[in-house]
């Protein structure tokens, strides 16, 4: 027998079929992998898109921002506590998104103070506002002539976010603590009438004491310009007394031409020892709704119908025109003036009375009580009083 192994039959077609099957299987797996990869990529893109959309919705909430409100950054605030309070107050919709946004925009140096923010505003606008320190934020506040300290405090509180009007009033009248003193009233801690009425730019971090000091110093500057320092030589009174007179002129006069004549009435009555009987003094510190006849009976040092001389303090802050009038009162009528015609020969003709005469704020002046009473009757008949 032969020992040689028989040859195995090799079918070329069978080998080809095997290769084809293997390739088909390979393509099937590759296709499945490609589909899976596509699905995963789509999920990643979808998740990323949803996350980004959600983030942008929180950065810039839909709808218009709310009306501006005051927000206080307090001592010790850091980004976490600040963002939490911003969310609690309705300024941002999500505190963590705000922190992420701030970090992405270079951070935030937190400075205590009051800021004006709009609820649900774009976080970029909120961040921009919080990056502006209070000392760089100003509010213009106009204090009209004739305002009292209480009225000033109310105006400041209405205009300056977070302003402490009660502290302003307390500091203006309270002698405790460091004294804010005017050179026109040494030792006087009641600042009524010593604050100049003007338009001020108030910084967000200014304290009531700082504002009071600015207003006192401006009154001193205006006083020097108007010659208040020389009042003893010009009208025989010290600057504080002149400011007291100027405050009464400010509250009484409605027109420029009347100011110096009202000043002359006040000086004449002081010189003659007459009570001033200035209506405006009755209302100082009183309920403005109190009937006038009741005010005339109140026993207060500001009741110039009952108490002689000047009131103890000014009753308001006079403006420049009233200070000028108090330093340069109008002359009395000449003897040839019709007002002086009924006086006895040689009797001094001096302005002593006045009453409102029309709805434009003009006054009728008189040198005798009879003339004054006639002016009052006319004003009543014409509906002015």
Image (tube, rainbow, N blue to C red):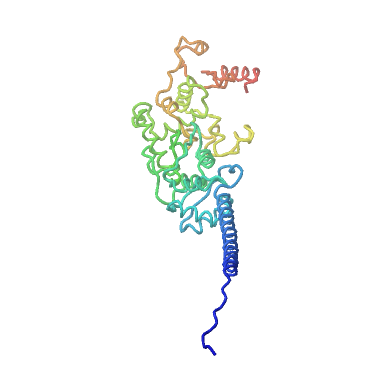
151 vs 379: above or below = below
Q: Is residue 192 above or below residue 4?
A: above
Q: Is residue 355 left or right of residue 236?
A: right
Q: Is residue 278 left or right of residue 201?
A: right
Rendered location of residue 315, percent (x, y): 50, 35
In the image, residue 178 lies at what x, y percent? Answer: 40, 50
Query: Residue 18: where, in percent of width, then height?
Result: 59, 69
Along the line of sight, the residue nearer the viewer: 310 or 263:
263
Depth order, front residue of 251/162: 162
Relative to residue 326, is residue 61 depicted above or below? below
Q: Residue at x 59, y 38 (%)?
A: 298
Of residues 278 and 75, the one drawn nearer to the viewer in this rendering: 75
Which residue of the protein is positioned furthest toward the bottom in this rendering? 1
**Residue extending farthest front:** 1
Quarter holding the C terminus is top right
Q: Nearer the viewer, residue 107 or 136?
A: 107
Query: Is 184 on the left-hand or right-hand side of 89?
Result: left
């Amino acid at each position: 027998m032969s020992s040689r192994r028989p040859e195995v039959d090799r079918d070329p077609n069978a080998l080809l079929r095997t290769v084809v099957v293997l390739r088909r299987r390979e393509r099937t797996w590759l296709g499945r992998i490609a589909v899976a990869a596509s699905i995963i990529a789509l999920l990643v893109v979808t998740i990323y898109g949803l996350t980004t959309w959600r983030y942008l919705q929180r950065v810039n909430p839909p709808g218009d921002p709310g009306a501006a409100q005051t927000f206080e950054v307090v001592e010790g605030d850091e980004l976490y506590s600040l963002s939490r309070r911003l969310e609690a107050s309705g300024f941002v919709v999500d505190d963590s998104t705000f922190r992420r946004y701030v970090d992405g925009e270079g951070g935030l140096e937190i400075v205590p103070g009051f800021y004006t923010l709009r609820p649900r505003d774009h976080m970029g606008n909120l961040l921009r506002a919080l990056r502006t320190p209070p000392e760089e934020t100003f509010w213009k506040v106009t204090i009209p002539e004739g305002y009292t300290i209480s009225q000033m405090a109310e105006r400041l509180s209405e205009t300056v976010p977070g302003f402490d009007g009660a502290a302003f009033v307390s500091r203006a009248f309270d002698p405790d603590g460091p004294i804010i003193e005017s050179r026109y009233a040494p030792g006087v801690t009641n600042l009524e009438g010593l604050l100049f009425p003007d338009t001020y730019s108030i910084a967000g971090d200014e304290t009531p004491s700082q504002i009071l000091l600015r207003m006192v110093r401006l009154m001193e500057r205006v006083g020097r310009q108007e010659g208040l320092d020389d009042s003893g030589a010009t009208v025989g009174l010290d600057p504080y007394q002149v400011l007291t007179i100027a405050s009464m002129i400010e509250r009484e006069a409605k027109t420029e031409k009347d100011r110096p004549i009202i000043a002359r009435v006040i000086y004449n009555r002081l010189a003659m020892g007459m009570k001033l009987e200035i209506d405006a003094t009755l209302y100082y510190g009183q309920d403005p709704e109190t009937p006038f006849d009741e005010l005339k009976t109140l026993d207060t040092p500001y009741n110039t119908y009952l108490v002689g001389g000047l009131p103890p303090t000014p009753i308001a802050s006079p403006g420049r025109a009233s200070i000028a009038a108090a330093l340069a009162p109008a002359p009395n009528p000449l003897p040839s003036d019709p007002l002086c015609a009924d006086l006895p020969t040689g009797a001094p003709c001096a302005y002593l009375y006045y009453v409102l005469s029309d709805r434009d704020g003009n006054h009728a002046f008189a040198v005798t009580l009879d003339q004054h009473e006639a002016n009052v009757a006319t004003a009543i008949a014409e509906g002015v009083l």
